[in-house]
Amino acid sequence: MNPGLLAAEWTKIRSVRSTVWSLIAFVVVAIGFSTLIAAVISNTWDRPGNHPNHVTLLTDPTGLIFGAGFGIGQLAIGVLGVLVISSEYSTGAIRSSLLAVPRRLPMLAAKAAVFAIIDLVCSAITVFAVFFITTSILSSHVTITLGQPGVTRACIGAILYLTVLGLFALAIGGIIRHMIGAIATVVGLVLVVPPLITLIPGTIANHVHGYLPTVAGSLIGQTSQQPADVLSPWQGFGVFCLWTVVLLAICGYLLVRRDA
Amino acid sequence: MAEVPGRVEARDLTKRYGDKTAVDHLSFAVEPGIVTGFLGPNGAGKSTTMRLITGLDRPDGGAATIGGSRYAELTRPLTVVGALLEARSLHPGRSARNHLLFLAQTQGIGGKRVDEVLDLVGLHEVAGKRAGGFSLGMTQRLGIAAAMLGNPKVLLLDEPSNGLDPEGIRWVRTFMRQVASEGRTVFVSSHLMSEMAVTADHLVVIGRGRLIADCSTAEFIQRSSERSVLVRSPDRVRLRELIVAEGGAVQDAAGADGDGTPGGGEGMVVTGLAAPRIGELAASAGLVLHELTPRLASLEEAFMELTADSVEYGETSAR
């Protein structure tokens, strides 16, 4: 790939405030919520009553650790993925960009590559920060180490999931182009659609739910496949990657075909 | 086929948006070394044509080329063509320098050139400021800086003086004349005939997406503000024969000039013959003249008359 295009996309992405704010929101929300949840679990450990969390910490520790914090924090990644491309349309900057790269696809490829790298680095820092902070908070009750089966894979998996999620959102941003519409679509697909599908009774709905992009994709952050899961962690991640590749292909096709 | 490097050519260019034809089989050529004005009323298809030339929009028919190549075929397009399209083609949150920097990086142009063009348009002081805070004039200057970034052979400017104060308009005019004198192609659109009359050497005039004229500015002015003479005479039938025999064209002025002036009904409008010659003809035949008035349409009138049929949203259009 032309290094000049990568440099240009890096300049674009670092020179607007929304990038920095979205990434800060992601890191703060993910670490903050995860820490809070771990602290609550630790403080209420010895209270009488049922503690389903304690069981989960033994069967699927990363599924719990990366659960709520990343569940909310990932929205910032989704929003940033949309912004990276749709803000060019909403501001008119796309005209300057396409005058410079009239073949268009190289610009999309460079944009996706640069954003993926930024997303990957931020996710790696956040995932390992969350892992070490939460496991040390819980260390007096339960020992969770990277050496346990599936734990290292789950940590790397969480990083990969967040990276692909960014590209998934970028593709939707490029297809819809309208910023608000694209953000609403991403939030809907991540937060709203999955629980609605589970309300439909029957095994078909269960399978549809299992193959939804973020439902399948987030399995990679679990330590092992849980009884209710339709897919294994790697299968789920594969399904998510497939969704993303298809959407990126549609995005690229429309970028070339449509008037700017 | 030998192609002139900086020559912009549109051949049979057609663009439809839904059932509305914005550009209709438009063909013209823009030559290097002069300023070519692209003139037409609002909605005539000027901006669409600019977008078709630069590949932002895909034509439904025909093609536009720059030095024989389509825009998308240029490997480093900004080093060949500099374009100032709609004023807001930038992210308001990005500084002027970063806007120019990313454009430079896509073309492999060094950062030094960014400072050069910032100097060229006088924006060095505010280069680090967010472009969203710029006045329209400053935004236009930044757009011109972006257009000049690759030191291009061809400049496409869409209404560059829109929203500028008189000082800014003068600056743009001087700038265009200078870059044209350096041998570059300058293609500048405007809906104001008066502005083009003092800036452009050559004119491409369109209305409703169709070509109306493609000629030198001098020729266009002469042609479109063609002199006419109002003549009133009691012997107008005989006078008319003399004028037609001499090569003039005669129209009854009753409709156009039935304004209640004395001698109504004996007036006629003569084109193609100057007032003194008409006077001489009348004198030699012993005919009485009541009035002999040379009339000169203003440029703006002439332009409006020429494009009257093609105005997209005229006062009479049913809505």
Image (spheres, helix red, strand yellow):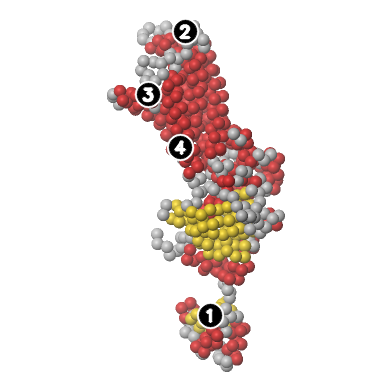
Whether residue A201 is visible, yes or no, is yes
Relative height, residue A156 to residue B176 (above, below): above
What separation in Å lies between label 4 and label 3 (alpha carbons)?
23 Å
Residue A8 horizontal/vertical position (percent): 61, 36
Q: Residue furthest left?
A: A201
Residue depicted at x 48% and y 58%: B24
Residue A28 visible in the snapshot: no
x 36%, y 10%: residue: A50
> Answer yes or no: do the residues labelled 4 and 3 have beta carbons within 8 Å?
no
**Of pointers 4 and 3, the one earlier in the residue sequence:** 3
Do pointers 1 and 2 mark residues of a single chain? Answer: no
Residue at left offset 41%, top offset 16%: A225
Q: Residue at x 50, y 61 (%)?
A: B210
In the figure, A238 relative to B108: above or below?
above
Q: Pointer 1 indicates a residue of which chain?
A: B
User: Vertically, is B249 above or below B207?
Assistant: below
Q: Position of residue B203 (x, y in %)?
A: 59, 62
Label placed on residue B249:
1
Residue at which label 3 appears: A210
Q: Residue furthest front?
A: B1
**Could you tell me which secondary element the residue under label 4 belongs to?**
helix
Q: CA distance from mark 1 to mark 3?
A: 84 Å
The amino acid at mark 3 is Gly
| Above/below status of A81 relative to B145 | above
SS type, badge 1: strand
Furthest-bottom residue in view? B286
Q: Residues within 10 Å of mark 3 (few under 14, many from 20)?
A: many
Q: Amino acid at mark 4?
A: Ile
Q: Mark 4 and mark 2 in contact (Cβ < 8 Å)?
A: no
